[in-house]
């Protein structure tokens, strides 16, 4: 059965390419005509490990096509994945206009029953609205389309791996037929039987959980999961601030906590906070959604507040170390919201850059992948060809995104090239004693400062 993927952003492209890799014929569509032209030429507009190879291979095999004609794409398909963006509105609620538009297009253009799958992260009850729109606008055709929620749990930088080796596949629907269709679609993933495009030898993986629920439950699982991850991050960041007050080491606190299998080690890395187009947006939407339902989600509001304060806290560290920030030359390593991606949306690194510029510092930056995306937003920065150029004659160096390649730099050479060997590590990326031994005045998050 042919699959249409509506919206060729990060989620849509990964979903379409991976389903094609599993052998399904897929047609991807997007209202950005330039993006479609690029994809047809095998050019993938986002950096995601393995994605460009997967797209090119499946386009070559004719299993993955791209078109700007959404009506044609949905008419020739039996399953339609809605992967359009749901960005935050001014008031923090999710903007569902793109989903509404796709639903109306499906209802008015389809002459046969479709399975419409919401993949985009949406507030609870969006699925019910989707069903209503399909009925209202499809009334004359007399066709009752099926609707399911199948939330994505893809992390940028490892999205292809997350698709092939998920912890769980969640299918929310009231239709047995829809459940069966999606279960068959994901069978190779559920059985973990496929030629893996990521690993030559897959790590020992347990089979994913298949969870079938009603639509609201599936939608809520997504928001609840992302918000819990954000909560863990803000919790360890709050503990980092306490560690600085009490002279404790947050890395050891995290290690001691994480050894408890009920807590787990993941998402206990303190730093300048969480960014990206998912956690910040999803937690905002969840809080607003809860409040519209009459529930004041104070817990998650506090998670947001702690995260917002990370930049203030980091800048205060810099001010204490530098005294005056204005007119100082400051190097920032990392602009992406996290390593492994060129995505700068809601990037804490760029929040730091913006504060440095506000305080009239002279800022030199380097990021292995994200500089071209940052350049139009921050033309006044000096974009360097490598970390050495960024650090040269600097009064301070800030590590804002923990790209693994920064570990293998010649830090003695960097230290000797700086006007002042001041290093602020916004992601606790380095070992304090090692950096102090190299001669840096080393500051990090929730750990004792070393000189
Ligand atoms: C997230 C969820 O992990 C994923 O399951 C969901 O489908 C989409 O949103 P992503 O936004 O790609 O994925 O990135 P993630 O790895 O979750 O990191 C989000 C932010 O949290 C980054 O800015 C990262 O630097 C930060 N982070 C992460 C921390 O500050 N500390 C941590 O311990 C982990």
Image (cartoon, rainbow, N blue to C red):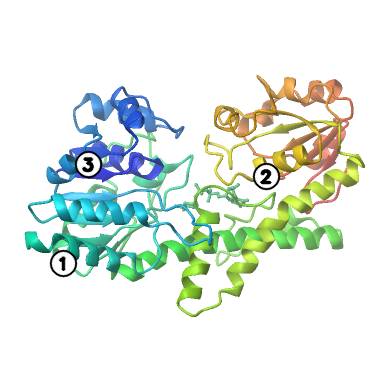
Q: Where is residue 213 in the image (x, y as percent from the top left)?
A: 29, 69
Task: Please give left or right for residue 377 compared with residue 93 in the image.
Answer: right
In terms of secondary structure, where does tag 3 sit?
A: helix
- Where residue 388 is drawn, which disc sits there? none
Give the camera-side residue of 221 and 315.
315
Q: In this view, does 296 lie above or below 80?
A: below
Which callout, 1 or 3, points to the residue nearer the camera?
Answer: 3
Q: In this view, does 51 lie above or below 82?
A: above
- Where residue 176 is drawn, which disc sits there? 1
Q: In which quarter of the image is residue 217?
A: bottom left
Q: Position of residue 48 (x, y in %)?
A: 45, 35
Residue under pointer 3: 70
Q: Earlier in the sequence, mark 2 or mark 3?
A: 3
Residue at the (36%, 55%) spot, across then down = 97
In terms of secondary structure, where does tag 1 sit?
A: helix
Q: In which quarter of the image is residue 236?
A: bottom right
Give the camera-side residue of 436 and 385.
385
Task: Please give left or right for residue 141 compared with residue 82 in the image.
Answer: left
Residue under pointer 2: 351
Mark 2 residue crowding within 10 angstroms, few (<14) / some (14–19) / many (20+): some
Task: Please give left or right for residue 428 compared with residue 38 in the image.
Answer: right
Give the camera-side residue of 426 and 84.
84
Label 2 CB, ligand 1: below 8 Å? no
Measure the C-alpha gap from mark 1 to mark 3: 27 Å
């Amino acid at each position: 059965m042919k699959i249409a993927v509506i919206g060729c952003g990060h989620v849509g492209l990964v979903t379409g390419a991976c389903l094609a890799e599993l052998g399904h014929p897929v047609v991807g569509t997007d209202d950005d005509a330039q993006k479609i032209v690029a994809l047809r030429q095998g050019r993938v507009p986002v950096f995601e490990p393995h994605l460009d190879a997967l797209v090119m291979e499946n386009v070559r095999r004719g299993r993955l096509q791209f078109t700007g004609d959404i009506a044609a794409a949905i008419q020739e398909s039996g399953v339609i994945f809605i992967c359009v963006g749901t960005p935050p509105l001014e008031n923090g609620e999710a903007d569902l206009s793109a989903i509404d538009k796709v639903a109306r297009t499906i209802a008015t253009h389809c002459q046969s029953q479709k399975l419409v799958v919401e993949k985009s992260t949406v507030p609870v009850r969006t699925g019910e609205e989707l069903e209503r729109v399909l009925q209202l606008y499809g009334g004359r055709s007399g066709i009752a389309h099926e609707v399911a929620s199948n939330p994505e749990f893809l992390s940028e930088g490892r999205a292809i791996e997350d698709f092939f080796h998920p912890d769980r596949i969640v299918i929310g629907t009231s239709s047995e037929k829809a459940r069966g269709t999606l279960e068959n679609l994901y069978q190779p993933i559920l059985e973990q039987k496929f030629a893996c495009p990521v690993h030559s030898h897959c790590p020992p993986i347990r089979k994913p959980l298949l969870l079938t629920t009603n639509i609201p439950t599936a939608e809520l699982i997504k928001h609840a999961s992302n918000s819990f991850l954000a909560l863990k991050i803000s919790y360890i960041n709050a503990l980092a601030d306490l560690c600085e007050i009490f002279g404790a080491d947050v890395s050891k606190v995290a290690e001691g906590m994480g050894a408890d299998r009920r807590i787990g080690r993941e998402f206990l890395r303190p730093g300048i906070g969480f960014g990206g187009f998912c956690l910040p947006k999803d937690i905002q939407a969840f809080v607003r959604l809860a409040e519209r339902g009459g529930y004041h989600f104070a817990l998650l509001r506090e998670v947001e507040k702690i995260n917002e304060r990370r930049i203030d806290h980091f800048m205060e560290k810099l001010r204490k170390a530098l005294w005056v920030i204005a007119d100082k030359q400051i190097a920032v390593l990392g602009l992406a919201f996290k390593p492994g991606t060129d995505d700068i949306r809601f990037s804490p690194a760029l929040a730091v850059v913006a504060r440095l510029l506000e305080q009239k510092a002279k800022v030199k930056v380097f990021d292995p992948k994200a500089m071209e995306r940052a350049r139009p937003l921050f033309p006044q920065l000096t974009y360097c060809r490598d970390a050495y150029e960024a650090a040269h004659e600097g009064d301070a160096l800030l590590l804002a995104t923990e790209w693994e390649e920064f570990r293998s730099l010649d830090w003695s050479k960097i230290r000797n090239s700086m006007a002042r060997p001041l290093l602020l590590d916004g992601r606790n990326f380095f070992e304090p004693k090692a950096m102090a031994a190299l001669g840096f005045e080393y500051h990090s998050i929730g750990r004792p400062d070393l000189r």
